[in-house]
Amino acid sequence: MVGKNILIVDDEAPIREMIVVALEMAGYECLEAENTGQAHAIIVDRKPDLILLDWMLPGTSGIELARRLKRDELTGDIPIIMLTAKGEEDNKIQGLEVGADDYITKPFSPRELVARLKAVLRRAGPSDSEGPIEVGGLLLDPISHRVTIDGKPAEMGPTEYRLLQFFMTHQERAYTRGQLLDQVWGGNVYVEERTVDVHIRRLRKALGEAYENLVQTVRGTGYRFSTKG
């Protein structure tokens, strides 16, 4: 967790400075941007581990940048925490709907910010520093992005890989198609829910007869990954 790069996007320098001090004391490395243009350049160049994104920014708003990032396959998996001075429920819901992972309302304490940030990074799933995930003879390695089944390489597309990675890190819980779209596709509003069914079928096919039953259909809800029959 320590040593991760956090991008702080806020047009108010005193707020950025306060956040930098708190995060550096907690062992994080900080990148700063005062508008969405600067932020986007840093994101493409440095691929931060998490983005703290202010809601109200000059020019393009923070929410618009979040929407754009979550739609892009290269940036869709970067966790985003929205910073907002507005406590209204609508803004929080709108932020979460575009794919933000959490929100925090100003003013906030440095301790609360660090706690929220740690929780989101934990939820973001396996990082490059974490080892392979294994279920029986099914092995997913997040570093090499390879899947092996009983020691043999499994052929699957990038979307099926991300689906499997999400399932293997969130076992024994049912998810709706909408939740899977948000988590795996990054809240891309242009993808229809039936697309999930297509990729589930492809994933099951890639897993083969021995492991396809790990991806279970939950009637009236969606899907779950379970080792229990």
Image: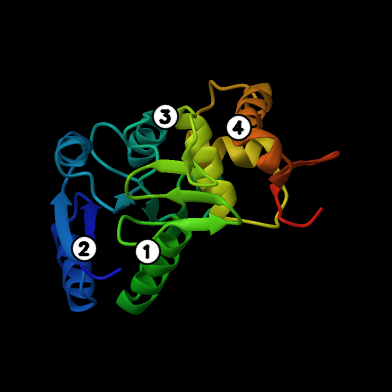
**Which residue position holds label 1?**
106
**Which residue position holds label 3?**
71
Which quadrant of the structure image shows residue 26? bottom left
Relative side of 161 to 51, left or right: right
**Which residue position holds label 4?**
203
Q: Are marks 2 and 1 in contact (CB under 8 Å)?
A: yes
Marks 4 and 1, how far apart in space? 42 Å
Label 4 crowd bin: few (<14), some (14–19), many (20+), radius 10 Å: many
Numbered disc 2: secondary structure = helix
Which residue occupies the foreground of this view, 47 or 189? 47
Relative side of 103 to 195, left or right: left
Q: Position of residue 213 (x, y in %)?
A: 74, 42
Q: Position of residue 18 (x, y in %)?
A: 19, 70
Numbered disc 1: secondary structure = loop
Q: In the rendered structure, which amino acid carries the disc numbered 1?
A: Lys
Relative vertical location of residue 151 with respect to residue 157 in this rendering, above or below: below
Q: Position of residue 209 (x, y in %)?
A: 70, 35
- Residue in the picture at 65% in, 31% down: 200
Relative side of 180 to 172, left or right: left
Precedes in sequence: disc 2 or disc 1: 2
Precedes in sequence: disc 3 or disc 2: 2
Numbered disc 3: secondary structure = helix
Relative side of 135 to 210, left or right: left
Marks 3 and 2, how far apart in space? 28 Å
Q: In the rendered structure, which amino acid carries the disc numbered 2?
A: Ile
Which quadrant of the structure image shows residue 13? bottom left
Quarter occupied by the N terminus: bottom left
**Which residue position holds label 2?**
15
Q: Nearer the viewer, mark 4 or mark 1?
A: 4
- Residue in the picture at 18% in, 60% down: 16
Q: Nearer the viewer, mark 3 or mark 2?
A: 3
- Residue in the picture at 15% in, 53% down: 32
